[in-house]
Image (tube, helix red, strand yellow):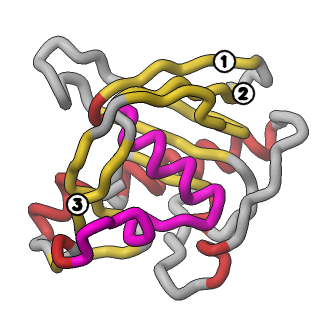
Amino acid sequence: MAIREIVLEGDPRLRQKATRVRHVDDSLRALADDMWETMLDAPGVGLAAPQVGVSRRLIVIHVPAGYDHDDDPEINLRLANPKIVRSHGRQLGLEGCLSIPGWAGEVPRADAVTVKAVDMNDRAVRIKATGYAARVLQHEIDHLDGILFTDRIEDKSTLRPVTEEEYDEVAE
């Protein structure tokens, strides 16, 4: 595993639609491992392949246990071709991004999502998530379509610089 360089806003690769994964193989698993290590090192809670300069529909997510509620389990996902197939509700929350360091803003998202994807064993999976985990999934899937969190902000006055401590709390 290796830590990869995170692509920053302004790089055209962040605005391209990522290529669909045809088959999960050892090279894709190695990329997911590198992304995992990169995400944890950053530190962040999610990372999409375009953020490390690779145009593949692959995301990794790590939401610590107890993030929304004390009894919430830890969520660790490595997903190819993730697609939101169902969503409902609305939440408004502060988001940041590893590709836009030092900035955060209030982003509306669905409160609950169902995501269809392929796991690293090349098996179809369905993930149901609510609250913060749903937010992280939506944020990372947006990256696969060339969408940044700043594109989703309704009230641009909420976009602001954040301290390093604040940024660590919202970086996705």
Residue 143, quarter of picture: bottom right
Q: Where in the figure is residue 2, as x and y percent of width and height?
A: 56, 57
**Left or right: 33 with respect to 160?**
right
Q: CA distance from mark 2 to mark 3?
A: 30 Å
Q: Which mark is residue 118?
A: 2
Q: Where in the figure is residue 64, as x and y percent of width and height?
A: 26, 31
Q: Per the image, is 104 magenta?
A: no
Q: Which mark is residue 125?
A: 1
Residue depicted at x 19% and y 30%: 67
**Left or right: 22 with respect to 127?**
right
Q: CA distance from mark 3 to mark 1?
A: 30 Å
Magenta stretch? 133-156
Query: Callout 1: helix, strand or loop?
Result: strand
Q: Per the image, is 145 magenta?
A: yes
**Disc 3 crowd, CA 10 A, few/some/many (<14, 14-19, 20+):** many
Q: Residue furthest right?
A: 22
Image vertical order of residue 88 relative to residue 123, above or below? below
Query: Callout 3: helix, strand or loop?
Result: strand
Query: Callout 2: helix, strand or loop?
Result: strand
Q: Amino acid at mark 2?
A: Val
Q: Main secondary structure of the magenta part?
A: helix
- Give the mark nearer the N terminus: 2 vs 3: 3
Q: Amino acid at mark 3?
A: Glu
Q: Residue furthest top?
A: 71
Q: Where in the figure is residue 82, as x and y percent of width and height?
A: 65, 37
Q: Quadrant of the C terminus?
A: bottom left
Q: Which residue is mark 3?
A: 106
